[in-house]
Image: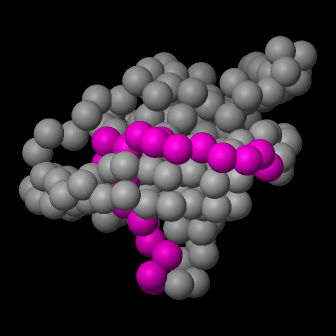
């Protein structure tokens, strides 16, 4: 089921998500299936559970945007264990539609997480996948990509969003 993606201004987007403790349940499988459906419908490369209103530490990532089934990644309770290098590239967010800004991230990251069965997995990401891992894990920690921008740029975006909200064009 495609769910509504919450937009900037919703408190859950800036809260730390809660660890998943029960695995391989129908509820978890349904949530992950909904996340995939929602992310693909929005043409995203990643989606964190808080973006659809669930306070769980779950993200789905597919840098192929649905073109390659083998690129689908589910990370539960993830943490970045290694960062190396730097890359700066334009980044956007399904919860902040219409805004894209350059963000500096690591070029290479290693992530430790759990899969849907609760098994520990270790993943390597470079370039776009490294960016996606960091972006999605940030979401689970209540951090949005605009938090990586200068105070001035962040302020400009917030003002534009407030203007859209007043005009009824943000909901």
Residue 60 falls inside the magenta stretch: no
Q: Which is more toward the observer, 170 or 127?
A: 127
Is 132 drawn above or below residue 68 in the view shown? Answer: above
User: Which residue is painted at 17% across and 54% down in the image?
Assistant: 118
**Which quadrant of the figure contains the N terminus?**
bottom left
Identify the residue shown where x is 63% and y is 54%.
108
Whether residue 132 sits left or right of residue 16 in the image: it is right
Q: Is residue 6 left or right of residue 104?
A: left
Q: As displayed, is residue 14 above or below residue 102?
A: above
Q: Does the rendering let one see residue 49?
A: no
Q: Position of residue 159 (x, y in %)?
A: 83, 18
- Which colour style is shown? one colour
Report the residue at 51% width, 36% height from top: 139
Above/below status of 66 relative to 53:
below
- Hey, which quadrant is residue 31 in on the image? bottom left
Q: Which residues are magenta?
A: 69-87
Q: Nearer the viewer, residue 129 or 170?
A: 129
| Residue at 78% from the left image edge and 40% from the top image edge | 104
Instruction: Indicate the quadrant containing the C terminus: top left, top right, bottom left or bottom right.
Output: top right
């Amino acid at each position: 089921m495609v769910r509504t993606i919450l937009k900037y201004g919703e408190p859950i987007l800036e809260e730390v998500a809660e660890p998943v403790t029960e695995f391989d349940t129908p509820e978890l499988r349904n949530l992950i299936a909904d996340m995939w459906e929602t992310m693909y419908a929005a043409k995203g490369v990643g989606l964190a559970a808080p973006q659809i209103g669930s306070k769980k530490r779950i993200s789905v990532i597919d840098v192929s945007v649905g073109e390659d089934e083998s690129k689908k990644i589910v990370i539960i309770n993830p943490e970045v264990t290694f960062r190396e290098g730097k890359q700066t590239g334009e980044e956007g967010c399904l919860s902040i539609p219409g805004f894209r800004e350059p963000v500096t991230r690591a070029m290479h990251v290693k992530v430790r997480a759990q899969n849907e069965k609760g098994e520990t997995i270790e993943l390597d990401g470079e370039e776009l996948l490294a960016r996606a891992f960091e972006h999605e894990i940030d979401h689970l920690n209540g951090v949005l990509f605009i938090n990586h921008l200068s105070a001035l740029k962040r302020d400009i975006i917030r003002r534009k969003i407030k203007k859209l909200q007043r005009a009824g064009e943000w909901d």
